[in-house]
Amino acid sequence: MKKQLCCLLSSGSAESKSSATGFLLLRLFVGLTMAFAHGLGKLPPGEQLVQGVAGMGFPMPEFFAWCAGLAEFAGGLLIAVGLLTRPAGLFIAFTMLVAAMGVHANDPFQIKELAYLYMTIGVFFTLTGAGRFSIDSILSKKCKIK
């Protein structure tokens, strides 16, 4: 179990100070923007969000509306601070995939573009981790994976 947790926290390979700074800047901007510009307004989920989730065919629409709001708000905060970055990135990527393919299914690409961009960044953090300047990096050093 400890090894699996350490893999979730792993920040990836060694990186230069400049690329670590790039990871940090991307995490802060994307995470805080996702949390406060997109997620905060969905908590608690309004009737329009719940009805939208129901309209996409999800069972228990109120539950899944909460999941979407929490993925965006809490996931954004976790990415910003670099804690549990890989799982947070995965939840954001999935939520943005649903937004692009469900909510904006009939919209032109220019409308879907933002959801696809956040989805891609979520996949990026799922695959790479948070980088050197993160809580994940500090915790993974304490795990000492062998």
Image: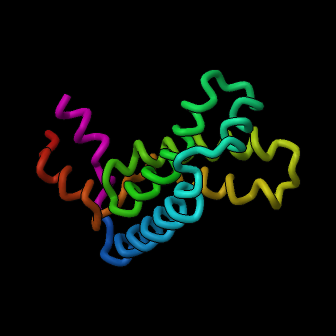
Q: Quadrant of residue 57?
A: top right
Quadrant location of the N terminus? top left
Q: Position of residue 99 (x, y in %)?
A: 69, 45
Specify how the rendered protein is coloured.
rainbow
Is residue 123 visible to us here? no
Instruction: Answer left or right for 107 relative to 10.
Output: right
Q: Is residue 12 magenta?
A: yes
Instruction: Answer left or right for 61 relative to 4.
Output: right
* Chain part drawn in magenta: 1-14
Given residues 76 and 125, the one toward you in this image is: 76
Given residues 16 and 141, the one toward you in this image is: 141
Q: Which residue appears at 54% of the width and 55% of the height?
A: 39
Q: With respect to residue 54, does 108 lie above or below? A: below
Instruction: Answer left or right for 76 relative to 48.
Output: left
Most extreme residue toward the front is: 47
Q: Which residue appears at 50% of the width and 59% of the height?
A: 35
Q: Which residue appears at 31% of the width and 41% of the height?
A: 8
Given residues 70 and 21, the one toward you in this image is: 70
Is residue 74 visible to us here? yes
Q: Position of residue 30 (x, y in %)?
A: 51, 65
Q: Is residue 120 magenta?
A: no
Q: Quadrant of residue 49?
A: top right
Q: Position of residue 21 (x, y in %)?
A: 36, 75
How many numbered discs, if any?
0
Most extreme residue toward the top is: 59
Q: With respect to residue 79, does 16 lie above or below? A: below
Q: With respect to residue 96, does 114 lie above or below? A: below
Q: Position of residue 107 (x, y in %)?
A: 86, 50
Quadrant location of the C terminus? top left
